[in-house]
Image (cartoon, rainbow, N blue to C red):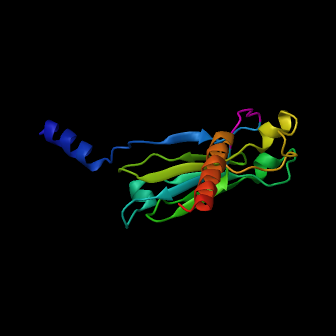
Amino acid sequence: SNNNNNNNNRANKKEKKGFYGRHFDRTRDDTTTCQRKISLLLYLNEDGWDGERDGGVLRAYIRPKKRDANSNANICVEDVVPEGGKLVLFDSSLVEHEVLPTCKERWAVVGWFLSEEGAARKRGGGGDGGKKRSHQSAGEEQNLNSSMKKKKKRRRRGR
């Protein structure tokens, strides 16, 4: 009978599966060429997700824009339930976040919009006057330009 009680207790407890600890997607001292600028999450979970029952909530720690000695005291905590179809975007270097433990499988598309802005400034402008650039690499831009030139030549020849 004691063995049956142990099995029942295990069945009644929800097993907590995954979580992701508190972090920034980009730190202020990041010197990589392509830096994460905006973080993106698109939840693909089935309807009826309950944050208390199912877990997997995204917790964001939003700091005030103006930094001062008491900035930690003014942090606003926002919880986002991962309901299917919900899109979340935030500044990768300003919003610290974590995923709380989940009790069931959680699906999401995760990505980042990238910028070479900081790296270009550190290299002395990078030939673009320090302006923001798209997420395309220089190689992708070169390939795009050469393929456009080939199409123009074909049009001139009547192809």
Between 105 and 117, the one nearer to me in the picture: 117
Magenta-colored segment: predominant secondary structure: loop
x%, y% of residue 124?
A: 88, 35
x%, y% of residue 129?
A: 88, 46
What is the span of residues highlighted in magenta in the rendered image? 29-35
Please give the name of the residue rendered at 33% of the width and 48% of the height, measured from the top-left corner.
14
Please give the name of the residue rendered at 36% of the width and 50% of the height, measured from the top-left corner.
105
Please give the name of the residue rendered at 54% of the width and 55% of the height, measured from the top-left corner.
41
Between 82 and 68, the one nearer to me in the picture: 82
Please give the name of the residue rendered at 81% of the width and 54% of the height, measured from the top-left corner.
65
Please tell me whether residue 80 belongs to the stretch shown in magenta.
Answer: no
Between 64 and 151, the one nearer to me in the picture: 151
Is residue 156 positioned above or below 16 on the image? below
107 left or right of 41 in image? left
Is residue 85 positioned above or below 16 on the image? below
x%, y% of residue 45?
A: 39, 59
Q: Is residue 78 in view from this perspective?
A: no
Q: Is residue 132 in view from this perspective?
A: yes
x%, y% of residue 93?
A: 71, 45
Please tell me whether residue 33 belongs to the stretch shown in magenta.
Answer: yes
The residue lying furthest to the front in this view is 157
Between 126 and 51, the one nearer to me in the picture: 126
Q: How many marks?
A: 0
Is residue 51 positioned above or below 147 on the image? below
**Image quarter hosting the N terminus:** top left
106 left or right of 30 in image? left
